[in-house]
Each structure stands twice: as C-alpha cells, then as structure tokens.
Image (spheres, helix red, strand yellow):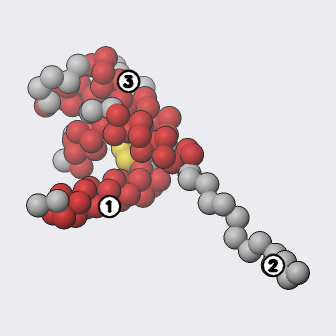
Amino acid sequence: MNFKEKQIERKIPPQESARMVETIYGCKWSLTVYQLLANGINRPGEMVRTVDGLSTKVLNQCLKKNTEFGILKKTVYHELPPRVEYQVTEFGNKFLAVLEQIEALQEDLNNLSR
C-alpha cells in the first residue's frame, strides 16, 4: 500500500479577529463613531451633541471596547477643564479597511439577489 503523507492541516478560523468584528458590528454606535472621527469630531462631548440618540454612557462603553481592541487611542490632556480625545490607531486603520471590504462584499451580495 502507498500511504501519502498529509500535506495540509485543517484550517481554523481566526478566533480573535472574528470576535472583534462581531463585537464591533454588535455595537450599533461603533460605525457612527468611526464616521465622526473621520469628520474630525474626536471629543466625546461633541460626539454626543452631534448624534441624536447617542448617550454618554453608551458612547463611553463603545469607546472603551474600541480602545481595548486597539482600534482607537485615548489621549487625556491634564488641564482644567479635563479634555479627552480619541484617534484611530495604525491598527485601527487596517481594521477599518477590513470593514470597508465587508461593506463592499455586502453590496455585491445585495446586487446578486436582485
């Protein structure tokens, strides 16, 4: 009998990145936050004032998740009154590019179903 050596192992899906995408899409405000940052609005108070229905509590939860994933960077300025700003990190820019590709894929799927 001729036994071939196995050349390819079972591919396992990326656990952490899949969870990250799921978490971000699960937070209904993350995409809005990215849009605000792209428009130069990077302070939480201004974000809440700019978007109807966005509360400070929910925004802070959303910003915390994004900061923990490394998508956003929080900068605290030690001045009175206190000032906090958020920026997209280098990793965050890569992540946002992936989200754009997912949105393009969704557009393609929508066009196929018509």
Query: Where is mark 1, residue-wise?
Result: 101
Label 1: element kind = helix
Q: Which mark is residue 4?
A: 2
Label 2: element kind = loop
Q: Is residue 35 visible?
A: yes
Quarter of the image with the N terminus is: bottom right
Which residue type carries mark 1?
Gln
Q: Nearer the viewer, residue 57 or 100?
A: 100
Residue depicted at 41% across the width and 40% down the height: 22
Q: Nearer the viewer, residue 41 or 67?
A: 67
Residue depicted at 15% across the width and 63% down the height: 111
**What crowding class fits label 1: few (fewer than 14 Cα within 10 Å), some (14-19), or many (20 or more)?**
few
Q: Nearer the viewer, residue 29 or 80?
A: 29
| Residue 2, quarter of picture | bottom right
Going from the N terminus, do you reach mark 1 or mark 2 first?
2
Which residue type carries mark 3?
Gln
Q: Is residue 38 left or right of residue 15?
A: left
The percent position of residue 55, horizontal first and vertical second, equals 23, 19
Query: Where is mark 3, residue-wise?
Result: 61
In this rendering, the answer to whether 83 lies above or below 98 is above
Which residue type carries mark 2?
Lys
Label 2 close to label 3 by CB (< 8 Å): no
